[in-house]
């Protein structure tokens, strides 16, 4: 049995007819399993509570071909894929066929303890490394995963150096965080970054408006991405080369999205008439060409889009592998509901096949009754091919481990000797503490900061001057070269420890998340600390939730907070952000009043980041309001109280007349503590 040659796998030679036939057989089985998983979960499996189970058969089918080529031919051991959320059954079906998932798990889609509705790195058991869903966030995370990998390569001279790949639904591009994120890939000159856009031209409710594909292409090109268009299938390409064959291409290009989708529902005879009479009069040249084909062949030709043609997909992925120095966007034209009787219907997003349709599909895909969950036996041509392909690509038969790796032995001191001004704010203290931490070698080499264009105004200037700004290549500091004085030394190189982002809060949290997973992804522990204006925390709230849900470990400071920006107007006040810190799982919220409290919290917080299983991320809410900073001796017990959430500043319980007097308990946090102390004196 011929096996895939290594040069086939890495894209240096064309796919052989044998390999193509095998891939097409695998493709059919992936289509069946992903469709049947949803059918079983909704219409066969017991459902005692009667609640909707759900699933997306049409959305899954549109990526089957793209995913089959990617997973069975191109993926490498250290590649990370953000898989299209609504197509998660396709991912699990492929992992099953690759031997990474037991059959019984397929029967537990959307069930408690079973496969998740959307891929989850912590809850799925078949090697998901990038959580996807809410839509758009997992795709955006690939950019910052690639950035974190590049950062590790420059700082530690080692990295698995995998590719970050997003399989994205075209409707996901509507999410605002997507255009926010794309530009950072250009700023940091990222390659080994692919986005494969499933351009099925449908959203949840209807058909995409005209010109949407052009808009998406221009968006990526404007952001500095290398765009590859995968529009026509190999059968169409061959037809175009015939005399007058270009007229079919003209029809495909001119046909409105809504009409093309509706014609997916028509028979071949009707489609033939539409094509040859496209401009209002019969085109005899095109009619003669199509006359050589049966009605079924005409329909198959008209719907042979590139995103469902494995030969063209393989050629496209090989082209993408040769692109260096730029991220790659592949715009793959597909059909939502491909291969299913609901193909192209604008109401197919949540539609599910009937029992009769499932039976018809089973027969069409050559699945035997009673073998609905069957994969490929090791002795079958497909089983042998998969085994050899996995071997050539050095893939493990086991899923990529998502359990935390052993953490290096790092010592984080419980306290520092930071010098604070007698009258200063917690925001000022943050900058001083970071500079002090830069003097602790085991911490400094792994400590890095991230800010969405507010680094200087959140007191990171001293840290940046000492530790530098990260850039993929060393860049001249022209202000220094021309002897112009600056408060901050903005030195950019691959050894810098600060990541400067644009004003985009989603990017900020996605970057924190992916740098906060560097230990699991790159094998190098990092201590990411971010600063953001507290009033703008909510602008990136979905991405913050994504980060903590994915198990990332990071620290961020929201500052200034409260009404300290009152002179900038009501829009810059942050009143309810403590509720975010209190309400989010896996996130601890602290609002210190004093600089020495913040020092204690940050040192402990870094220790939390080292605990990859039980540790939590931290949100510290700071202020520019200055308070008196008398520094007491901090005992171990006082440190424990701070980290537990509170301690007595004034305690009158030991006084003789305590029980006879009216007692008032005053609780306060942050900059209101001095006010609370004055209130205590007033009522005393």
Image (cartoon, rainbow, N blue to C red):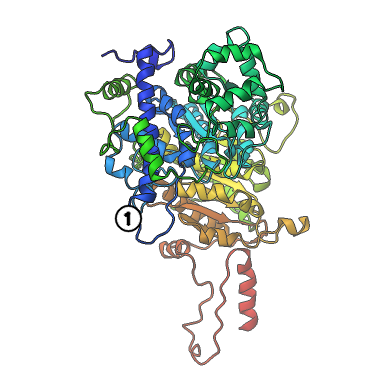
Viewer-nearest residue: 173 or 246: 246
Q: Is residue 229 above or below residue 521?
A: above
**Dividing the picture into quarters, in which one does residue 69 lie?**
top left
**Residue 445 visible here:** yes
Q: Badge 1 local density, few (<14 within 10 Å), some, or many (20+)?
A: few
The picture places residue 263, in percent across and down from the top left corner, at: 58, 31
**Dividing the picture into quarters, in which one does residue 230 lie?**
top right
Viewer-nearest residue: 10 or 435: 10
Q: Is residue 73 above or below residue 676?
A: above
Judged from this view, the residue extending furthest toward the left is 379
Viewer-nearest residue: 428 or 298: 298
Q: Is residue 111 above or below residue 89?
A: below
Where is the N terminus found, in terms of image quarters? Answer: top left
In this figure, what is the number of numbered marks?
Answer: 1
**Residue 77 visible here:** no
Judged from this view, the residue extending furthest toward the top is 243
Asked which secondary structure carries label 1, the reply is loop
The picture places residue 680, in percent across and down from the top left corner, at: 61, 78
Where is the C terminus found, in terms of image quarters? Answer: bottom right
Judged from this view, the residue extending furthest toward the bottom is 660
The picture places residue 241, in percent across and down from the top left corner, at: 58, 8
Q: Is residue 82 left or right of residue 623?
A: left
Residue linked to disc 1: 46
Viewer-nearest residue: 198 or 182: 198
- Residue displayed at 60% across by 68% down: 673
Q: Is residue 452 left or right of residue 324?
A: right
The picture places residue 260, in percent across and down from the top left corner, at: 60, 30
């Amino acid at each position: 049995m011929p096996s895939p040659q290594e040069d086939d796998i890495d894209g240096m030679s064309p796919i052989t007819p044998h390999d193509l036939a095998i891939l097409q057989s695998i493709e059919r089985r992936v289509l069946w399993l992903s469709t049947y998983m949803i059918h079983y979960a909704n219409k066969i499996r017991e459902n005692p509570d009667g609640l909707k189970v759900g699933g997306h058969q049409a959305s899954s089918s549109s990526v089957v071909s793209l995913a089959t080529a990617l997973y069975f031919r191109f993926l490498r051991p250290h590649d990370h894929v953000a898989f299209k959320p609504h197509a998660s059954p396709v991912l699990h079906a492929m992992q099953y066929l690759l031997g990474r998932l037991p059959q019984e798990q397929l029967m537990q889609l959307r069930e408690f303890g079973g496969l998740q509705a959307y891929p989850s790195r912590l809850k799925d058991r078949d090697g998901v490394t990038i959580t996807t869903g809410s839509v758009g966030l997992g795709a955006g995370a690939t950019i910052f995963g690639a950035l974190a990998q590049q950062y590790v390569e420059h700082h530690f001279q080692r990295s698995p150096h995998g590719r970050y790949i997003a399989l994205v639904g075209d409707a996901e591009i509507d999410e605002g965080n997507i255009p926010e994120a794309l530009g950072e890939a250009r700023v940091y000159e990222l390659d080994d970054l692919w986005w494969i856009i499933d351009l099925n031209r449908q959203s949840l409710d209807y058909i995409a408006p005209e010109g949407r594909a052009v808009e998406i292409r221009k968006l990526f090109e404007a952001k500095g991405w290398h765009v590859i268009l995968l529009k026509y299938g190999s059968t169409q390409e061959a037809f175009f080369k015939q005399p007058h064959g270009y007229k079919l291409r003209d029809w495909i290009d001119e046909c409105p999205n809504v009409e093309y989708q509706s014609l997916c529902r028509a028979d071949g005879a009707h489609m033939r008439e539409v094509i040859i009479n496209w401009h209002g009069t019969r085109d005899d040249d095109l009619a003669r060409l199509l006359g050589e084909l049966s009605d079924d062949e005409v329909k198959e030709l008209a719907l042979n889009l590139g995103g469902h043609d494995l030969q063209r997909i393989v050629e496209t992925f090989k082209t993408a592998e040769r692109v260096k120095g730029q991220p790659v966007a592949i715009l793959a034209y597909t059909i939502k509901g491909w291969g299913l009787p609901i193909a192209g219907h604008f109401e197919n997003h949540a539609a599910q096949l009937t029992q009769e349709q499932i039976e018809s599909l089973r027969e069409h895909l050559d699945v035997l009754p009673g073998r609905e969950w069957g994969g490929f036996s090791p002795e079958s041509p497909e089983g042998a091919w998969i085994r050899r392909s996995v071997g050539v690509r050095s893939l493990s038969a086991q899923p990529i481990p998502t359990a935390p790796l052993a953490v290096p032995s790092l010592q984080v001191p419980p306290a520092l000797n930071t010098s604070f001004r007698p009258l200063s704010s917690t925001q000022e203290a943050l900058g001083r503490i970071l500079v002090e931490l830069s003097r602790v070698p085991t911490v400094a080499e792994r400590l890095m900061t991230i800010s969405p264009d507010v680094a200087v105004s959140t007191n990171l200037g001293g840290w940046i001057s000492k530790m530098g700004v990260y850039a993929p290549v060393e860049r001249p500091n022209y202000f220094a070269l021309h002897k112009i004085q600056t408060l901050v030394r903005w030195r950019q190189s691959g050894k810098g420890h600060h990541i400067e982002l644009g004003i985009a809060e989603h990017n900020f949290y996605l970057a924190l998340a992916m740098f906060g997973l560097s230990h699991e992804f790159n094998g190098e522990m990092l201590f990411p600390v971010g600063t953001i204006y507290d009033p703008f925390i909510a602008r990136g709230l979905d991405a913050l939730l994504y980060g903590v849900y994915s198990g990332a470990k990071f620290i961020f400071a929201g500052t200034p907070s409260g009404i300290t920006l009152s002179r900038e107007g009501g829009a810059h006040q942050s009143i309810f952000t403590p509720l975010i810190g209190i309400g989010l799982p896996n996130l601890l919220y602290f609002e210190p009043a004093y600089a020495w409290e913040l020092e204690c919290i940050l040192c402990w917080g870094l220790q939390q980041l080292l605990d990859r299983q039980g540790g939590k991320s931290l949100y510290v809410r700071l202020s520019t309001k200055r308070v008196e900073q008398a520094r007491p001796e901090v005992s171990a017990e006082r440190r424990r109280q701070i980290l537990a959430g509170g301690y007595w500043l004034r305690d009158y319980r030991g006084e003789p007349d305590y029980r006879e007097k009216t007692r008032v308990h005053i609780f306060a946090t942050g900059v209101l503590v001095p006010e609370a102390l004055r209130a205590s004196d007033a009522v005393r």
